[in-house]
Image (cartoon, grey):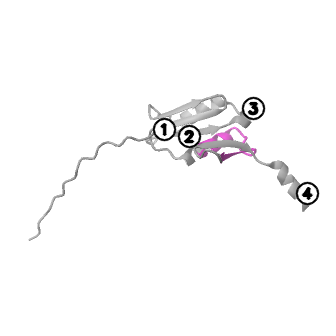
Amino acid sequence: MVQVVKKKTANVGTKKVKAQIFTIDCSKPVDDKIMEMASFEKFLQDKIKVNGKAGALGDVVKVVRDKSKVTVTSEADIAKRYLKYLTKKYLKKNGVRDWLRVIASNKDRSVYELRYFNIADNEAEEEEE
């Protein structure tokens, strides 16, 4: 005969999830008037997916813009890489992806920066060859 043993499980309390804060620094393209922060903020609000639904941020995700920075605060799990993907998608949509790139900041790893490609360095290398 085989005895069936039931295991008792303890009730695990709810976990408090620490809010994740990501910042996208767009100061260089905004200073050169290549990019509008209002349209970028609206793009992120429309495209960020929460529980598989785009645009339904609710109280879980907040997108706030300052002068040249967009801050995304999330209580749900959002990958930092996902914000990079959306930023690159926005740049491609507006036709400036060829001149700008998205780079993680050296100082703070929760910050992405938009920088120009070094076109002058590439031209100098081509002239040497």
At label 4, the amino acid type is Glu
Residue 26 is covered by the magenta coloring: no
Q: Which dot marks residue 74?
A: 1
Image position of 7 with respect to 50: above or below: below
Query: Where's residue 59, x and y in %?
Result: 44, 31
Which residue occupies 64% across, 39% down? 90
> Toward which corner of the image does residue 87 lie, by quadrant?
top right
Name the N-terminal-most of marks 4 and 1.
1
Q: Residue visible at 65% across and 38% down?
A: 25
Find disc 3 in the rendering and name its residue: 31
Which residue is label 4 attached to?
127
Give the mark nearer the N terminus: 3 vs 4. Answer: 3
Q: Nearer the viewer, mark 4 or mark 1?
A: 1
What residue appears at the point 91 percent right and 60 percent down from the top-left corner? 128
Q: Quadrant of the N terminus?
A: bottom left
Q: CA distance from mark 4 to mark 1?
A: 48 Å
Q: Look at the image and give the residue range highlighted in magenta.
A: 84-103
Farthest residue to the bottom: give it.
Answer: 1
- Give the mark nearest the N terminus, 3 or 2: 2
**Which element type, helix, strand or loop, lies under badge 2?**
strand
For numbered disc 1, what is the local secondary structure?
strand
> Dot 2 corresponds to which residue?
22
Q: Amino acid at mark 1?
A: Ser
Q: Nearer the viewer, residue 103 or 3?
A: 103
